[in-house]
Image (tube, coloured by chain):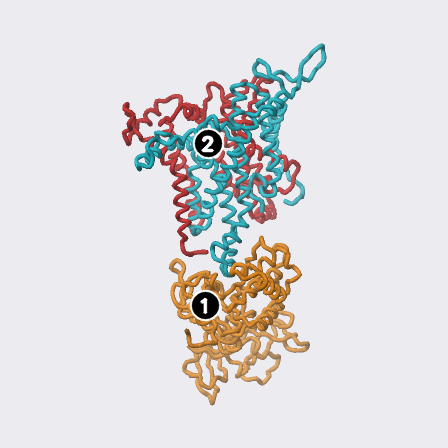
Chain colours: A red, B orange, C cyan
């Protein structure tokens, strides 16, 4: 109901909820600017840890590797997931539908270790038979992350395609467009917002993966999550705060850019013609 | 306490604006107890907002509202003796028909025996006893409407609000549902306030009609009075078609005047005894009052014309007739075999008569 | 498309993902299942081959050693139970914290909802490891929470919060929150506002209307979201490893140790498959509420 009295419990809930959600974020950012002093005390604010980060080759290499991995695997995840989401959303029945659904559900429901294990088996087996890569390394990681990311993309695209206006595709067919053209000019463009958010989710997933990476990474392919993970087992390392803050800024920039593009697009569409 | 005890609802100077846009402006309304009143207007006229304010689902920005003498300021919806039948019915999908109907009674803490008695009465009144155990998604549109009605009636409200009750129904059902609603209202005696954009519905169902335009009530009265004596062009055209002419009148005799249109036509018209001739600025004739014939019929104010277009409508024929000066008239004729209406075709030369006592006179 | 012929484009959209997932997920899972009946050996990889040649015959060296080990040792059962309890507690925490948040956003004025949703989701676009790390930094003995409590005079020495079961619970709830909040919000937002207006019109006070209208209609979505948290939480490895202690060994940790440390791959495979199957069964039962890919069934 619009304009109803603002119920205080809602505002309290939101305030507390957001405080809880952002407390760790705040700590990451603030602590990244803590200085370093031999007597154990900090000096605030200071760029000490950012400087330390800039010369920490191991961590930087790992970060770069993870970025490459995410940018290589996410497009594949997007292709697989988008096709699956469109198929599931458009066609109520087809041979293999339940199999596809079940397979897409596995990464959501199965323990991560089982998944990592499976991938290792697959690639180790392949490696043994074909001599490829010994079943480890970047290519295997790309394929594994693509497989893990596809269900997320599929889920988002599926939801969007399910709720679409079928009349649009019918209209295209009525006007004489063949199936491929309908797909490329109507189905796909309508799914774009879902595809984009699915893509971002796949990237996030790739950055988060520790377990599968541990199974598949070779000695030269430590990823950022793996580096952070092993560093964490030793203790708190403010360099990680620095990297975290940089990641946060990156995410914020991507979001702002996306938001700007979307609203510019909307404004362009509502400008009077001519 | 307001003075008029036969008014169940009194609105005084009610206003409401959304984000700076006025939706209701200085609305005054007195609804007689036990009557059916329609709020008739186009979308954007503010009628639905007015209904929601009466129900307590929205608060007015200004003005007073009292029900049965009680000021409703600050009284929330759940405490008002008013119930609303929503346009989409808003039936609770997780409850059966019986569950829906007894919801309000349960919410108000009515004890079980009394509840059962009242629910049985309401189910019977709305003729839905046989699907008391079904869920809303197992019912047709008409059945759902009756459940919504029963759910309201069981609360024995002082006022029952109906938001576009016919909108979701098939055309064929509407006349029957209208009759049922009227007979239920007469049986129960609750005051009904109906929001509608359909003038036929308003004319058919109401004891009184409030015509709304852009947030104001422009005329309130009985259907016949509004139809035959509209007070403005807007009301004249909202309640049915009318052939309107601008012009002025001069006296001819007792209750007779000569109306000269701005196009130079002259009509002899009868008018009310207390009408100030100088204030007349327009006069019109309803399509069904025009007399159309092939030969001159000797009716007052006869003019020659040519039939432009004929539309067959089952029981009626609508014709567009062009008269001198290029003016187009709408005429409606009954299709009785052999009558003019049944035989008219485009291109025919006809004579159009404007009976003096059929004139609808408008003042500034 | 309702059951009519499939075009070539349709077939492509089906075949490509199906082939990929079969090859890269189904096939390896079968391998893992097979692995569980292999014997161990001192080799790389540390498994004895399934087939061997003796006297010119092929023989099958399948063994149920892994399964009998798994069934026999109390440790594995305890770890599994511990994982179940932890997942259940996480689920309860996510519902308890996530439901009010989802409700508050859904009931906020329409213009603000997207903004609130964005704010609620933004933290989770950062790496989840980073967030777990942040909690370590916050709750450790030398962290700001203890510092604040001490400066307020409420405690004399730091309260050990890190490396406790409570820490595991806290970080898991925090990490799994969006899996509950987003679907829960979607369900609540889809409830027709008119129903609440009708309830009020009929005489229901806000609390009564919430109990009798909002809650029953939101329940399927709530259960679906809860299950979406519970099931993956059972197999969680990273969080208990980072912030837990030896008493919080769960099935994830067991699997990791069996694989990487004890190098008993068949046993790890057996445990992993058993866990997986034990989770699949309830999710099939709950299919009524969980639609495809975890979306809520209408």
Q: Which mark is residue B213?
A: 1
Task: Please give left or right for residue A158 compared with residue C6 in the image.
Answer: left
The residue at 41%/43% (across/down) is A17
Q: Nearer the viewer, residue B247 or A196?
A: A196
Q: Quadrant of residue C143?
A: top left
Q: CA distance from mark 1 to mark 2?
A: 67 Å
From the viewer's perspective, tell me whether residue A173 is left or right of residue A240.
Answer: right
Closer to the eye: label 1 or 2: 2
Identity of the residue furthest to the bottom in this view: B253
**Residue C247 visible in the shown view:** yes
Residue at left offset 36%, top offset 36%: A26
Relative image position of residue B240 (x, y in whole percent): 53, 72
- The chain that hosts pointer 2 is C
Q: Which residue is mark 2?
A: C165
Residue B333: x and y in percent read: 61, 75
In depth, the one of A232 and B256 nearer the eye is: A232
> Mark 2 falls on what kind of element?
helix
Disc assigned to residue B127: none
Q: Position of residue A109 (x, y in %)?
A: 56, 34
Q: Position of residue C186 (x, y in %)?
A: 50, 46
């Amino acid at each position: 109901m619009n304009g109803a009295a603002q119920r205080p419990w809602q505002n309290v809930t939101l305030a507390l909820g957001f405080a809880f959600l952002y407390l760790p974020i705040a700590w990451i950012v603030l602590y990244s600017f803590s200085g370093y002093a031999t007597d154990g005390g900090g000096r605030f604010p200071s760029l000490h840890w950012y400087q330390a980060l800039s010369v920490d080759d191991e961590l930087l290499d790992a970060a770069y590797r993870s970025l490459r991995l995410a940018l290589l695997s996410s497009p594949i995840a997007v292709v697989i997931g988008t096709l699956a989401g469109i198929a599931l959303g458009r066609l109520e029945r087809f041979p293999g539908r339940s199999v596809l659904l079940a397979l897409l559900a596995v990464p959501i429901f199965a323990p991560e270790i089982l998944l990592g294990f499976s991938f290792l088996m697959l690639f180790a087996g392949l490696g043994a038979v074909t001599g490829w890569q010994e079943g480890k390394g970047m290519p295997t990681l790309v394929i594994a992350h693509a497989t893990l990311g596809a269900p997320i993309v599929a889920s988002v695209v599926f939801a969007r395609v399910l709720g679409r206006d079928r009349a649009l595709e019918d209209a295209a067919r009525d006007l004489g467009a063949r199936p491929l053209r309908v797909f490329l000019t109507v189905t796909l463009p309508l799914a774009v917002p879902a595809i984009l958010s699915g893509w971002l989710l796949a990237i996030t997933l790739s950055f988060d993966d520790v377990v599968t990476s541990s199974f598949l990474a070779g000695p030269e392919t430590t990823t950022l999550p793996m580096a952070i993970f092993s560093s964490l087992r030793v203790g708190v390392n403010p360099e990680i705060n620095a990297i975290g803050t940089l990641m946060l800024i990156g995410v914020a920039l991507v979001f702002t850019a996306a938001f700007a593009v979307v609203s510019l697009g909307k404004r362009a569409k509502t400008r009077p013609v001519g | 306490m307001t003075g008029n005890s036969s008014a169940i609802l009194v609105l005084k100077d009610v206003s409401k604006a959304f984000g700076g846009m006025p939706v209701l402006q200085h609305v005054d309304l007195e609804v007689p107890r036990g009557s059916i009143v329609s709020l008739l207007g186009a979308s954007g006229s503010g009628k639905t907002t007015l209904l929601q304010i009466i129900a307590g689902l929205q608060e007015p920005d200004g003005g007073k509202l009292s029900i049965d003498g009680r000021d409703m300021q600050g009284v929330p919806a759940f405490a008002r003796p008013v119930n609303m039948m929503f346009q989409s019915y808003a039936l609770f999908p997780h409850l059966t028909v019986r569950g829906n109907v007894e919801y309000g009674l349960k919410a108000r803490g009515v004890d079980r025996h009394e509840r059962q008695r009242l629910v049985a009465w309401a189910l019977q009144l709305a003729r839905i006893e046989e699907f008391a155990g079904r869920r809303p998604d197992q019912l047709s549109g008409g059945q759902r409407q009756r459940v919504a009605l029963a759910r309201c009636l069981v609360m024995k409200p002082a006022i029952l609000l109906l938001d576009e009750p016919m909108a979701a129904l098939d055309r064929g059902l509407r006349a029957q549902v209208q009759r049922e609603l009227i007979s239920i209202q007469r049986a129960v005696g609750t005051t009904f306030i109906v929001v509608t954009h359909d003038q036929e519905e308003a004319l058919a169902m109401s004891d009184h009609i409030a015509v709304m335009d852009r947030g104001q009530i422009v005329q309130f009265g009985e259907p016949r009075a509004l139809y035959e004596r509209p007070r403005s062009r807007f009301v004249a055209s909202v309640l049915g078609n009318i052939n309107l002419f601008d012009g002025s009148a001069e006296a001819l005799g007792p209750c007779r005047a000569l109306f000269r249109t701005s196009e130079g036509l002259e009509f002899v018209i009868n008018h009310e005894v207390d009408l100030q001739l100088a204030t007349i600025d327009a006069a019109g004739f309803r399509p069904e009052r025009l007399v159309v014939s092939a030969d001159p019929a000797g009716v007052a104010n006869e003019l020659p014309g040519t039939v432009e277009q004929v539309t067959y409508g089952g029981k009626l024929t609508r014709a567009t007739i062009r008269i001198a000066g290029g003016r187009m008239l709408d005429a409606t004729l009954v299709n009785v075999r052999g009558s003019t209406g049944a035989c008219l075709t485009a291109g025919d030369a006809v004579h159009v008569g404007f009976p003096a006592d059929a004139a609808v006179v408008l003042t500034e | 498309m309702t059951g009519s012929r499939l075009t070539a484009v349709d077939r492509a959209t089906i075949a490509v993902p199906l082939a990929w997932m079969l090859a890269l997920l189904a096939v390896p899972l079968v391998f893992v299942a097979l692995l569980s009946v292999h014997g161990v050996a001192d080799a790389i990889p540390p498994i004895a081959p399934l087939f061997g040649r003796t006297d010119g015959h092929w023989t099958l060296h399948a063994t149920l050693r892994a399964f009998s080990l798994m069934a026999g040792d109390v440790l594995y059962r305890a770890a599994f139970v511990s994982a179940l309890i932890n997942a259940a507690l996480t689920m309860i925490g996510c519902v308890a914290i996530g439901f009010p948040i989802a409700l508050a956003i859904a009931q906020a004025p329409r213009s603000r909802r997207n903004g609130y949703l964005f704010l609620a989701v933004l933290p989770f676009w950062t790496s989840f490891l980073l967030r777990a790390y942040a909690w370590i930094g916050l709750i450790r003995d030398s962290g700001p929470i203890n510092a604040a409590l001490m400066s307020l005079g409420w405690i004399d020495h730091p309260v050990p919060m890190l490396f406790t079961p409570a820490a595991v619970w806290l970080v898991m709830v925090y990490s799994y929150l969006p899996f509950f909040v987003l679907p829960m919000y979607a369900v609540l937002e889809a409830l027709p506002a008119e129903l609440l207006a009708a309830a009020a019109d009929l005489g229901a006070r806000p609390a009564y209307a919430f109990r009798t209208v909002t809650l029953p209609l939101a329940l399927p979505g709530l259960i679906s979201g809860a299950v979406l948290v519970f099931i993956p939480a059972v197999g969680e490895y990273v969080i208990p490893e980072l912030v837990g202690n030896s008493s919080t060994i769960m099935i994830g940790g067991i699997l990791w140790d069996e694989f990487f440390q004890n190098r008993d791959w068949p046993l790890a495979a057996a445990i992993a498959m058993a866990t997986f199957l034990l989770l699949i069964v309830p999710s099939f039962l709950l299919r009524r509420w969980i639609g495809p890919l975890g979306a809520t069934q209408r």
